[in-house]
Image (cartoon, rainbow, N blue to C red):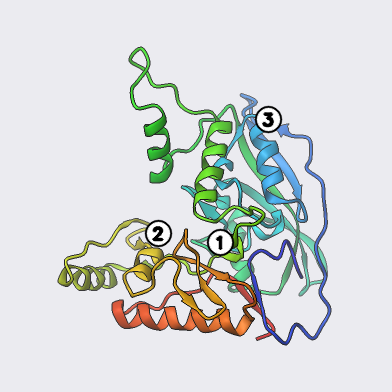
Amino acid sequence: MLGGGSNLVIADGGWPGLVVRIAIGGISSPATNDAAGNAVLFSVGAGVDWDDFVAQAVAQNCAGVECLSGIPGSVGGTPVQNVGAYGQEVSGTIESVRALDLKEDRIVVLPKPACGFRYRASIFNTTERGRYIILRVNYRLKRGGAASLKYADLQKHFAERFPEPVAGKKTPPSLAEVREAVRAIRRSKGMLLVAGDADCRSAGSFFKNPVLDEAQFKDLAARAAAQGLEIPSYPALDAQRKVSAAWLVEHSGFCKGYARGAAGISHKHALALINRGDAKASDIVGLKDEIQHGVQEAWGILLAPEPVFVGF
């Protein structure tokens, strides 16, 4: 079952079977469902281009997905790995998922709690992998809500643009301004599809940020301190800590622009493995293995890949 295909690595031998591309369209006319008229429900077909939906939500002044602008792929893929970026995750707005249950041969509606959302995970790519075909996703957004500015790069972007408060009060950026800022930041990191940009020839961020328990984090911090380094991190998932996979990669001997034959690392983003021209899937996987080995040897952490591997 294929969505937008943006998060796949397909083996050189291809896939010896039937591929069905989900092309269910349609974005429902928003309907409010609270007394104040602020909560807006969008029902979106799984085949809708994700960024088209974000653009429409922002145009209708509905907050909740503006920081997820510019992510390639389709709506149906977003619940699978609980897509997130720049301080937002889709689990923050998903109300329910309509899917075909292949095990019971019927269409079901799974409320948010049943989806088991965690960092880059859900039942759709873990415990119930392969059971459901997502048909539609229902999102609850907030009309007139404030844009999210949790992410450091966004805060820096707007601090540089509006360094001083006007008349003692800084006007917060609009949803549209945040959307354009996110797209600009993604473009600068090669994470926006731009024609002719070689650094865009990737499957996006190839490795997940590791989430460590306290003991693992202390061990990592000690290793870093021994080298005069400090680990960038932020609290995540209860008492655990999420650390930057990009930092680990760059401090394991793999710089931006690193090349391994026809495969390489983007010049703009340490987590993007790119096709430098005529790379085979085996070249990309070889580079993945080399990076994983290097990071594990340097820091004792095995990086987990984000893309789906087909035909291997």
| Residue 287 can be seen, yes or no | yes
Q: Which residue is mark 2?
A: 237
Is 225 on the left or on the right of 35, as rendered?
left
Are there few (<14), some (14-19), or many (20+) residues within 10 Å of tag 3? some
On the image, the x and y values in percent for residue 234 come to: 33, 55
Are there few (<14), some (14-19), or many (20+) residues within 10 Å of tag 1? many
- Alpha carbons under labels 2 and 1: distance apart: 32 Å
Depth order, front residue of 96/219: 219
| Residue found at x 44% / y 38% | 149
Secondary structure of residue under mark 3: loop
Q: Quadrant of residue 159?
A: top left
Q: Which residue is mark 1?
A: 199
On the image, the x and y values in percent for residue 21 come to: 81, 66
Residue type marked 1: Asp
Q: Which residue is mark 3?
A: 60
N-terminal of the pair, mark 2 or mark 3, is: 3
- Alpha carbons under labels 2 and 3: distance apart: 32 Å
Are there few (<14), some (14-19), or many (20+) residues within 10 Å of tag 2? few
Residue type marked 3: Gln
